[in-house]
Image (spheres, coloured by chain):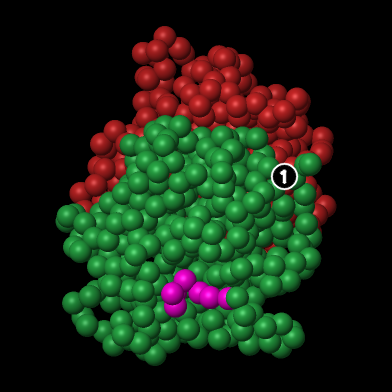
Chain colours: A green, B red
Amino acid sequence: MPTKKLGSQTVALASPPSIIGHANVVGKKEGEGPLADSFDHIEQDDTFGEKSWEKSETAMQKMALASALDKAGQAASNLDYLFAGDLLNQCIGSSFAVRGQDVPFFGLYGACSTMGEGLSLAAMLIDGGFAQFTGVVTSSHFCTAERQYRTPLEYGGQRTPTAQWTVTGAGAVILAKDGPGPYITHVTTGKVVDKGIKDANNMGAAMAPAAYATLTAHLQDTGRKPSFYDLIVTGDLGALGKDIIRDFFHKDGMELANYDDCGTMIFDLKKQDVHCGGSGCGCSASVLTGYLLNGMRAGRWKNILFCPTGALLSPTSTQQGESIPSICHAVAISTSK
Amino acid sequence: MPTKKLGSQTVALASPPSIIGHANVVGKKEGEGPLADSFDHIEQDDTFGEKSWEKSETAMQKMALASALDKAGQAASNLDYLFAGDLLNQCIGSSFAVRGQDVPFFGLYGACSTMGEGLSLAAMLIDGGFAQFTGVVTSSHFCTAERQYRTPLEYGGQRTPTAQWTVTGAGAVILAKDGPGPYITHVTTGKVVDKGIKDANNMGAAMAPAAYATLTAHLQDTGRKPSFYDLIVTGDLGALGKDIIRDFFHKDGMELANYDDCGTMIFDLKKQDVHCGGSGCGCSASVLTGYLLNGMRAGRWKNILFCPTGALLSPTSTQQGESIPSICHAVAISTSK
């Protein structure tokens, strides 16, 4: 069966690639949250022994990738292609992590949707016959993000109620042409959606319409109902964005019973002072590569729709009065082909 | 014939996609250079009527994409996928240009190699059966780059002899499953190479080893000699990087007679005070979509190897004393399949 284009945004992969390795590394705060048991490595020192936060983030990506490759029983040099991206200016977290990996590299910028973007392309390159093995790695770090997007930590800035807490974490996934699964069966690629939200401290509201658009396209393209999935999970909409998505679907006459958001899963919102929840490329990446994929392997879920969301703004665009273009990429993951 | 993986970094596309539209937009200085006749639109006002340089860059991308789509006779909504990226923090030149385009979008960060990275993925998604039409657009702007990477224009900073001049320009390419060509026949994906160069004002020297590595891999993987190509063209190595590449090949016993660099082609290095030449994503993109593809259509060249190069540094990595990781992606373009 050839690969089938379904509707305008979705492809059903003819030979769904298998996830043969996945791993993550997180910081201290994430290790104190409800998903602590699902992380491969919890570092108590968020510097990761490095002299700058940016180098710490690079160190996390390297560790996550090395661990995922180890679990997959592959060397980096066996990868046909590696996809990576992060939130730092010019994506230096990734470029410096990939330096020395001896693997053909495609750099991505999809903000917090990067793991979804990377899995989409990595899966298509295998299904298209261009690769046997591909990898995806992404990260975020609370301290690099605060300095770059908001204020240096030392300023002790106040956070608004709708703010989210950038996850210190990295996640990596290794895909193979053949393997025991879980499999990536469908890829729905997002369009840029911008409903005019200008508050950079309310990214959940900015990104929710993009998530709604991609989810709706996925359901229309595949003819599936939300109930087909044991779990539909967005990346980092947080508590407010999660409510907005539910409202959108409610207006369409659909109740998303089996829906959650990585940003609200990774922290205890009441006890950990993270306001609306976690965010950052590392949020959905570390939840996917731990709690979600471990759960699929353990038989907890058979079908998951993984939908990380990205806010494609910059401090400069915000200073210039611009609203926040957003995107969401959906990847269907199943324990059977 | 199925798609064939050649060596470790190259694929030969089974059904080479056709370039069915290409266009560019450049600024005043580029329009005063030796390639002036090859540009679709030369704007005398580098603000492009916008209130910030970042918005000017977005305007260029929109114009280039619209023009390429027009030449291809396609609406943006007919594209299955659009790839875009630029040099701005969080790639806002692209995100804001794609906003409102109604097309599934993959954001890239490959620094000045972006047009090569985008063409590689856009061609593979068509050849792999995932798309009928894909697009790639990228840009750079002298004024956004100076402010972000060096100093605001008003400071009147001195430039070092090895410095390059960021091209104000955008280029867009539309690919289709079928068409009259030119065709993308081979894709060689670069690895990150870093030989320890730390001078951010000498990117030619930093990127030359990456270009050499990718070119060498391409020639080894395909079994072709440099003379197979009517023209081998790197992205923005400039005068110094160009000499370095020639030296590398000379040491290997090969003379690159048919070799040039977009950074030395787009400006008159003696008269236009650009020191080592042009640079930026828009440099190779505007030379490809004008001079090179127009020349192929006019019968001047049959086979071109297009090898844009990217320096994956940031001001932060330079301030932290880091060297410059670099990459080069090669795309073989031919008038016959």
Secondary element at image label 1:
loop
Question: Residue B75, how many percent across, how many down?
Answer: 79, 59
Q: Is residue A33 left or right of residue A332?
A: left
Classify residue A153 by image quadrant: bottom left
Classify residue A326 by image quadrant: bottom right
Magenta residue span: A259-265
Q: Residue furthest front?
A: A299
The residue under the point 67% across, 55% down is A186
The residue under the point 30% across, 82% down is A272
Instruction: Determine whether A125 is above or below B70 in the image.
Output: above
Q: How many numbered dots are placed on residues in this image?
A: 1
Residue toward you, B61 or A230: A230
Quadrant of the drawing holding the N terminus of chain A: top right
The residue under the point 42% across, 17% down is B249
Viewer can see residue A2: yes
Q: Chain of mark 1?
A: A
- The answer to if A261 sits in the magenta stretch is yes
Number of other residues with Cα within 10 Å of mark 1, as a class: few under 14, some 14 to 19, many 20 or more: some
Question: Residue A170, how many percent across, how many down?
Answer: 37, 58
Classify residue B244 by image quadrant: top left
Question: Residue A79, how many percent across, how many down?
Answer: 47, 36
Instruction: Determine whether A137 is above or below B309 in the image.
Output: below
Which residue position holds label 1? A14
Viewer can see residue A90: no
**Looking at the picture, which amino acid does disc 1 mark?**
Ala
Question: Residue B149, how many percent across, how many down?
Answer: 35, 57
Residue toward you, A183 or B109: A183
Residue toward you, A166 or B24: A166
Q: Is residue B121 left or right of residue B153?
A: right
Instruction: Determine whether A281 is above or below A273 in the image.
Output: above
- The answer to if A166 sits in the magenta stretch is no
The residue under the point 78% across, 57% down is A6
